[in-house]
Image: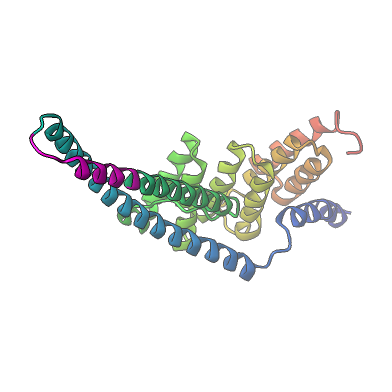
Amino acid sequence: MPNQRMKVPFLVLLPMLLASSGCVTMWKFNDTVGGLEARVRTLEQEKEQLATEQRSDRDRMESVRQELADATDALRKGGANLGADVDSLKQDMARLKGVDEEHAWGLGKAQEDIDAIKKALDGLGAPIVPIAPALAGDRDGLLAAAREAVAKGDGAQARGLLRRFLETFPDEPRAGEAQYLVGESFFKEGKWGQAVKEFQRVHDRYKDRKDAPVGKSLLRIADCLLKQGDCRKAGGVYLYLSDLEKKTEAAEQAKAALKKLKKTCKGL
């Protein structure tokens, strides 16, 4: 009977997690992320070029404005017949204003596209965030900065730092903690579905590591399911955890939560 009991939570948990994570293959995921990152780099380059051109045109506009002011002043004083020159300068000013408006629109559009792609990458769990070169190879610094970002509610920054940590130091003993923090950043934003995916990865990738927060992650998965109104699946997670870790603190919490949930969750 103990073996049969173990199968029940697996049957409840596995379909739920497969449904939440989808059927996208890893190569397709990497291809999607790589394409989006390349598009961001291209847009950033285009944006910088537009900004450079805008700065140059604004310098020219300021020069023409000053020339126009000087010419107008000279014309008012009757010092010279500068009517034609003033008209020409006014035309230059109008043209430059039009060019400046085009640049401003182009910069705004490029930024909108960049923001949209960055948001999509963040949803895929691969946000683009600026990381100081000195920090990029510093495992302690990356994790400390990520913890701080999670505490401050800066989820995107935290995920960028944590992804870099996990990519650079996949065998680090604290990799499970880093993966947990990715899920926690989504949890704090109320993105329950994405949080479940990330907490599930702690279980799938690090369940054989002694210090990985697997039980803690499963409790969070149950929290997410309850937030989504699915008490039966949450109960299945509690049951699975209580069997998986037996006498750990997380397992005891799961048993207590399951006992309480049975009083209010129909069909559990």
* 45, above or below 186, in the image: below
25 or 7, which is in the foreground? Answer: 25
Residue stretch in magenta: 79-95
Left-right relation of 203 to 232: left
Left-right relation of 42 to 229: left
Picture coordinates of residue 26, whole percent (x, y): 63, 67
Asked if one can make out residue 268 in the rendered structure from this viewpoint, the answer is yes
* 3, above or below 247, in the image: below
Picture coordinates of residue 42, whole percent (x, y): 44, 62
Which quadrant is home to the C terminus? top right
Q: Residue at x 70, y 40 (%)?
A: 224
Picture coordinates of residue 87, whole percent (x, y): 26, 42
Figure coloring: rainbow
The main secondary structure of the magenta stretch is helix
Picture coordinates of residue 203, whole percent (x, y): 65, 54
Would residue 42 be counted in the magenta stretch?
A: no
Asked if one can make out residue 169 in the rendered structure from this viewpoint, the answer is no
Furthest toward the left, the residue is: 79
Q: Residue at x 49, y 52 (%)?
A: 114
Corner quadrant of residue 68? top left
Which quadrant is home to the N terminus? bottom right
